[in-house]
Image: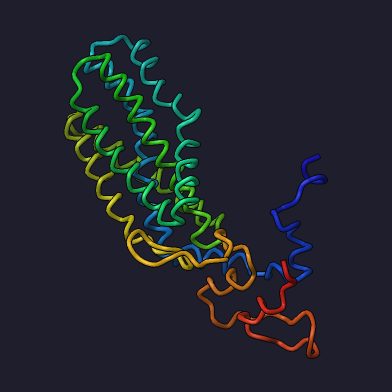
Amino acid sequence: MIYFISDDAPKGNYHEMKKNGTMPQVSATACFQSGVFNFNTWLLFMQYGCCFGVELTMNNAAALYFKEEFNQTTESAAAIASIFGWMNLFARGLGGLCSDRSNAKWGMRGRLITQLVLLILEGATVLVFANTKSLGASIVVMVVFSIFVQAAEGSTYGIVPYIEPPATGSIAGIVGAGGSTFAVGFGIAFRQMEYDDAFIIMAGAIFASSLLTPFICIRNHSSLFFGVDRNGEDDAAFDAGRWTLHLPFKNIRAKRKEGSDEEDVPVQSVEDNLPSQ
């Protein structure tokens, strides 16, 4: 039902957009390479590792932590630890919402500010949680900690679609893999070290990842401290000219749909031939 009554994108179905020249045909390999070789992809890979990787680690370690540190039964400790995961019901979406609201006011700089603030608050609550010695207070701090962890996940994916629009799928996969990768490292730390030391390492990694935010520089968008968003342009970069210009391959050319005998023209001129909005 959805297949027959819905469109692929706000501007229409992909096959129609390609036929009309509003969406260039770019190979999957070129899109993947474009995403892999974009420096911003790997910055978000590390930042997502320090939020989703933290979530995966806490899902595994929290029950044992409450059992050993607060002398809870296995059942009780597991029930308390499950609260961390329940925050997924709203916290991840809340992070995305904050990113969207900030973008509406300050453009991409707003999204980056949101990302920076959430990561700093996440790192701070890790340290508070590790140093809270009463059961009740520890549960309350864990709830706040979980909210910031998952809100940071949402704000990360609020940035992902802007990095390289044609390669969003590849970039999303790479960024998501950061969570599993960092979870392995955090898991080893919790297995080999005392809880206090493991939490310090976790917090240090989160704070370090937040310092990467000023280095996120997305074409046609402002960074944390410099630049401006291009006025009058679609934030998601859905026009064909910018889709192609973002790719790091200079020899990509397009066929002119109308005009001089199907002459090959540089991709920069594709935008000139698009129908008016």
Residue 275 at what x, y percent from top left?
75, 72
Say which quarter of the image contains residue 267. bottom right
User: Which is nearer the eye, 10 or 50?
Assistant: 10
Answer with left or right where residue 41 lies relative to residue 128.
Answer: right
- Give the residue displayed 57% in from the left and 66% down from the top: 232
Residue 23 at what x, y percent from top left?
69, 67
Residue 171 drawn above or below residue 275: above
Residue 159 drawn above or below residue 227: above
User: Which is nearer the eye, 66 or 246?
Assistant: 246
- Give the residue displayed 74% in from the left and 82% down from the top: 256
Residue 223 at what x, y percent from top left?
38, 62
Pick the quarter of the image with the C terminus. Answer: bottom right
Pick the quarter of the image with the N terminus. Answer: top right
Residue 85 drawn above or below residue 100: above
**Colour scheme:** rainbow
- Give the residue displayed 53% in from the left and 57% down from the top: 170
User: Which is nearer the eye, 198 or 119?
Assistant: 119
Answer with left or right where residue 24 lies relative to residue 143.
Answer: right
User: Which is nearer the eye, 238 or 72?
Assistant: 238
Say which quarter of the image contains residue 3. top right
Q: How many marks?
A: 0
Residue 110 at what x, y percent from top left?
41, 52
